[in-house]
Image: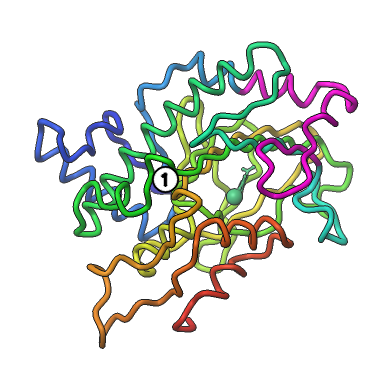
Amino acid sequence: MQSLRTRSPLSISPNSADPAQRSKAIHDLSKACQDWGFFLVINHGVSESLMENIMEGCYEFFNLTDEEKKAYEGSDVLDPIRCGTSFNTAKETIFFWRDFLKVLVHPDFHFPDKPKGFSELALEYVERIREISGELLRGISVSLGLEASYIHDVLNLESGLQVFVANLYPPCPQPELALGMPPHSDHGLLNILIENGVGGLQLLHNAKWVNVRAPPNSFLVNTCDHLEILSNGRYKSVVHRAVVNNATTRLSLAVANGPSLDTIVRPAPGLTDGANNPPAYTPMKYKEYLQLQQGNKLDQKSVLDRIRLQKE
Ligand SMILES: O=C(O)CCC(=O)C(=O)O
Ligand SMILES: [Fe+2]
């Protein structure tokens, strides 16, 4: 797997003092986005203890009683706090071997008030993730030949949507008959994931499933549908899934970073030209896209396929 071994995400900042290091990092970033759509960020400056404590908070949340968790169930896909099983049990006939907690944490911060202290930790964690995501998106803008602040400005990241998603996959007696999460791509711009050292994530690369691990203290980042739209298909979102095992509980924590809900997203005009490279996706408001994806069965890249203009 491609790994982005920068000294810190800051070293890809266009304002970095060392131009050679900066251009190497941007080149690596561009290659990682094009070749794999998944990469590791190490030496990112987020403390080990914050990463451990936030995972611990997730375990404790899932260990609350069913009664306590019921208060956070939610009903609408845009409810600020939702927890449950599978992905969307209203639409699925076969459920997935997964418990989840999904919380909207930006532009307004929401969070369950239990377990004690979890909310304060989460606030600190998602702020750090937003800094890393913002820095990576500056590098990605430059790698696409755009102004460093292009993605931030055009997609209104000042009020960008950030979603905290904890996934718990308990041991499954017949793992070969079940999936934790079905093949899908993610809706936003960049997802940033950590896990508890138990494998299970797989990505589709050249029509084969490849196992992916996020080593301790690293972030596993993947490019999502709205980066594919904005880059007019240059950086594709990658289909991935979670498999389960019969021995150990797996916990993953993904933070989704996307445009603001009211932004209409379209391919960057600077990356299209009339005849040779016309816009390949219909503009759509991010909120509508999200409602379509979260309100249905999770199915490969089905929502992106609906707005694709040139069929692949
Ligand atoms: O658990 C995992 O590793 C995958 C989670 C995931 O794909 C997601 O939350 O979108
Ligand atoms: Fe995902």
- What amino acid is at disc 1? Phe
Which residue is disc 1 drawn over? 39
Near mark 1 (Cα within 10 A), the count class, few <14, some 14-19 or many ≥20, is many
Looking at this view, is 177 or 128 the one in front?
Answer: 128
Q: How many marks?
A: 1
The residue at the point 69 percent across, 25 percent down is 112
Magenta stretch containing residue 158, yes or no? no
Q: Which residues are magenta?
A: 55-84
Residue at 80% in and 33% down: 247
Where residue 119 appears, as percent x and y from the top left, is 61, 19
Q: Quadrant of ligand 1?
A: top right
Q: Look at the numbered disc 1 and say if its residue's Cβ is closer than 8 Å to ligand 1.
A: no
In this view, the residue in front, 68 or 227, is 68
- Magenta segment includes 82: yes
Question: Mark 1: which secondary structure?
Answer: strand
Q: How is the image coloured?
A: rainbow
Left-right relation of 223 to 24: right
| Residue at the outermost front position | 262
Q: Nearest the camera: 204 or 140?
A: 140
The part of the image, by quadrant, that contains residue 177 is bottom right
Task: Give me the residue at 82% from left, 21% from top.
Answer: 64
Locate residue 109, reporting x and y percent. 55, 29
- Of 270 and 235, which appears nearest the observer? 270
**Percent position of residue 186, x then y:** 55, 54
**Left or right, 84 with reference to 108:** right
Q: Is residue 258 above or below residue 124?
A: below
Query: Who's the residue at 34% across and 64% down the image?
Result: 231
> Toward which corner of the image does residue 270 lie, by quadrant?
bottom left
The answer to whether 128 is drawn above or below residue 294 in the figure is: above
Q: Position of residue 91 (x, y in %)?
A: 81, 61
**In this picture, is 158 found above or below 27?**
above
